[in-house]
Image (spheres, rainbow, N blue to C red):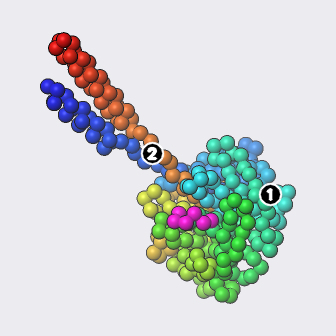
Amino acid sequence: MKCKVITLLSAASLWAAAAGTAQAQSVLYATGNGSGPGAGLSGLYTVNPSNGASTLVWNFPDIAIYAGGLAYDAATNVLYATGNETSSSGISRLFTIDRFTGATTSFAGMSSSFNLSSGGLAINPLTGVMYATGTDGLQSTALFTIDKNTGAATRVGQAGTGCCINLNGLGFGNDGTLYANGFDAAGPDTTSHLFTVNLASGAATNIGAHGVLLGRQLAYSGLAFRDDGTLLSLGSITASANGLYSVNTLTGTALLLGDTGVQYGVDGGLTLVPTGLIPEPETYALLMAGLGLLGFVARRKRKIQERAV
């Protein structure tokens, strides 16, 4: 009997370990125009990564991050955004956002020769280095690195050698490939395209057109990879409606997933915040069953010992 009970206990323990924990769905965040009662200048939203349905989380009355980038640092659990303060609108800044309270902190202003207020933002998952896009007075967009401790931006290089490749939203793949939304203003096709960006030089390589022809298209939206590896972007559905798209990383083709339902624009950042491992309800039941079985074994053993005495 003793061996049988222990076997049952071991089986229950293994079953609980196998059920263990499950990865909760990550949370997709976006920045854009403020909305709702008392709408702020900018807003932070959650976006359903499957159908695009969006919910306002916080309004920000005094900072302009509706057209900037958004990035999450998994190493420090910090959400970053780029934009500017209304009190000094000509100066680009890095911000942190507390997604639970809506509190923001502002870093010192960047060089006045850089404008990163309407560019992308992304953190390399392999190195932790933060990258941004913006302008520095030349015709093509530049790639920058940003110091996460000081907010200072350092130019890496231009997206193109001449006129006029415009790169905006950024997003890193798990393999360290940097993707960008943008367009070539001097090319035969000036609609929005997907690009990759060389981290050492800033040079952009065109993957292909999104195939969205109305409104703002996908040219200015941030990029984020869903849990299943699908690349996501905001974009126009019509001249006045906005949606969430999946983007083919091999061709650039965009597929509409659904309307956001909130007209906060498609020029802001997009980033995925992974959740921690959380126990499933079945795990609790198995754990309690295992503890009950353990208690039964202990009581039976005590009774046997008492009889032996």
Residue nearest the observer in this picture, 186 or 227: 227
Front label number (1 vs 2): 2
Observer able to see residue 162: yes
- Range of residues picked out in magenta: 125-130
Q: Is residue 197 left or right of residue 69?
A: left
Asked if the stretch drawn in magenta spans residue 126, the answer is yes
Image quarter hosting the C terminus? top left
Measuring 64% from the left and 47% from the top, which residue is drawn there?
A: 99
Observer able to see residue 184: no
Measuring 24% from the left and 36% from the top, which residue is drawn there?
A: 10
Asked if the stretch drawn in magenta spans residue 93, the answer is no
Instruction: From the image, tell me which residue sits under label 2.
Output: 277
Residue 85's tag is: 1
- Figure quadrant of residue 30: bottom right
Measuring 57% from the left and 63% from the top, which residue is drawn there?
A: 128
Measuring 73% from the left and 61% from the top, which residue is drawn there?
A: 150
Query: Which residue is situated farthest in the right direction here?
Result: 87
Local secondary structure at mark 2? strand
Determine the main secondary structure of the stretch shown in magenta: loop
Tell me where residue 266 appears, x and y as whole percent: 64, 62
Q: Earlier in the sequence, mark 1 or mark 2?
A: 1
Task: Say which amino acid is labelled 2.
Answer: Leu
